[in-house]
Image (tube, grey):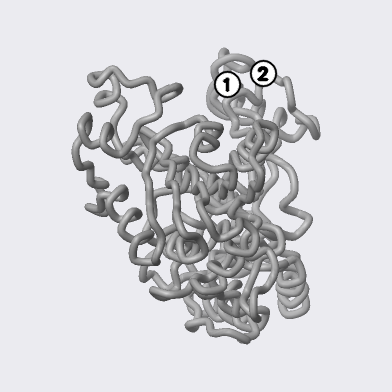
Amino acid sequence: MLLYGCTNLNTKGEKIYMERKVGTVSRGIRCPIIREGDDLVKIVTDSVLEAAQSEGFELRDRDVIAVTESIVARAQGNYASVDAIAEDVKNKLGGETIGVIFPILSRNRFAICLRGIAKGAKKVVLMLSYPSDEVGNELVSWDQLDEAGVNPYSDVLTLEKYRELFGANVHPFTGVDYVDYYSELIRESGAEVEVIFANDCRKILNYTKKVLTCDIHTRARSKRILKACGAEVVCGLDDILNSPVNGSGCNEKYGLLGSNKSTEDSIKLFPRECTDLVLDIQKEILEKTGKHVEVMVYGDGAFKDPVGKIWELADPVVSPASTPGLEGTPNEVKLKYLADNDFKDLSGEALKEAISNRIREKKDNLVGDMASQGTTPRKLTDLIGSLCDLTSGSGDKGTPVILIQGYFDNYVS
């Protein structure tokens, strides 16, 4: 069996290799508060090395250092005002009646964007998906739809019909009635508002031919369908602020997608190109420690809450940048499958050795191999980013950098 490279000496002065007893470890790393223009390469590197010294651990090859997208965008100064959003919306959609379809229900993620969108139009036809938004925030429950005899795949509800059937529905976590909240935001921004509920993007064309589709992961399909069905202008959130407006921040690839509320009148955008950042951190760590680590920038994790039904991924991607060693998907065999099938007649050391040999001899590509069934077929950056998001949290932990050790280990490491 391969043993961990840490050694002790016996009474004869001979090296004894100790078997490693710990697998993956995820640590939140405390950092200073990041401001625009800060040197993130130095701050991240110093923070990780200071944490290692403080807590008594050492960096190893293939450790992963992950930096939350929030501090990357903050260091880049990637901010924009409501007025910048309004000007871009008006220029691209004409400033009259626009359809705003499939937004997520979020004070942090969308409300400030909506304020800017409404300032760039005279009337907003707001089309909400139901029973929930794209990431799982419910307007109504499936049970309520069944009881009302409503078919969400075909039925279009007016605001009056929605209230007649379902009354006021507040979000269980935020206590907000998002229908009222979004309607009032639009009015406060100087636009008229009409609210409808539908899941077929084509329905908005009965109200206006100029559409801003606000879905995240299905946006390409929505744009394609709308254009094919006669929409005059179709934009996604990724088309708004994809270049600077009067010196504002922007994101060339994602526009408003991945943005967060900064103040009541401004947003922090998703970070711009940051591949150089992860490569520079990797290089700095190598120079200071001799260890080749992997580095990534992460945003929302990609997982679903079984109770609240909310799918966390409101960012366009989990990781906008990573070092080349984080490309691909896991290539693992399932230990319980081997124990219950291939080696079901073995136990103890014989079972341990048989499984260890199977891991050592595994192919570089296990696609189609029954021994890999049940392993997670997802990108490494999505899996690691989800672990990072859970470790750092979104509140006051003060750990915007995550160090993950042992992620690429296996049973014989």
Provide the secondary structure element on which disc 1 rests: helix
The residue wearing badge 1 is 337
Sequence-wise first label, 2 or 1: 1
Q: Which residue is mark 2?
A: 370
Residue 394 percent across, percent down from the top left = 41, 63
Q: Nearer the viewer, mark 2 or mark 1?
A: 2
Q: Is residue 135 above or below residue 157?
A: below
Identify the residue at horizontal 64%, vertical 35% (top origin). 221
Q: Front-most of 333 and 329?
A: 329
Determine whether, in the image, residue 13 is placed left or right of residue 403.
right
In this view of the protein, which residue sits in the foreground, 180 or 275?
180
Whether residue 336 appears in this view of the structure is: yes
Question: Where does residue 41 sit, x and y in percent of width and height?
Answer: 67, 79
Q: Amino acid at mark 1?
A: Tyr
Residue shown at 26% from the left, 54% from the top: 174
* Residue that appears at 71% across and 28% down: 358
Identify the amino acid type marked 2: Met
The residue located at (66%, 22%) in the rendering is 371
Q: Which quadrant of the figure has residue 223?
A: top right
Few, some or many residues within 10 Å of mark 2 (<14, 14–19, 20+): few
Let me know if residue 21 appears in the view: no
Q: Quadrant of the N terminus?
A: top right
- x and y percent of residue 140 in the render? 29, 34
Q: Is there CB contact under 8 Å for labels 2 and 1?
A: yes
Q: With 240 as the anchor, is 32 left or right in this view?
A: left
The spot of residue 389 in percent (x, y) is 49, 56
Whole-angstrom CA distance, mark 2 to mark 1, is 8 Å
Q: Which mark is residue 38?
A: none
User: Residue 224 sits in which quadrant?
Assistant: top right
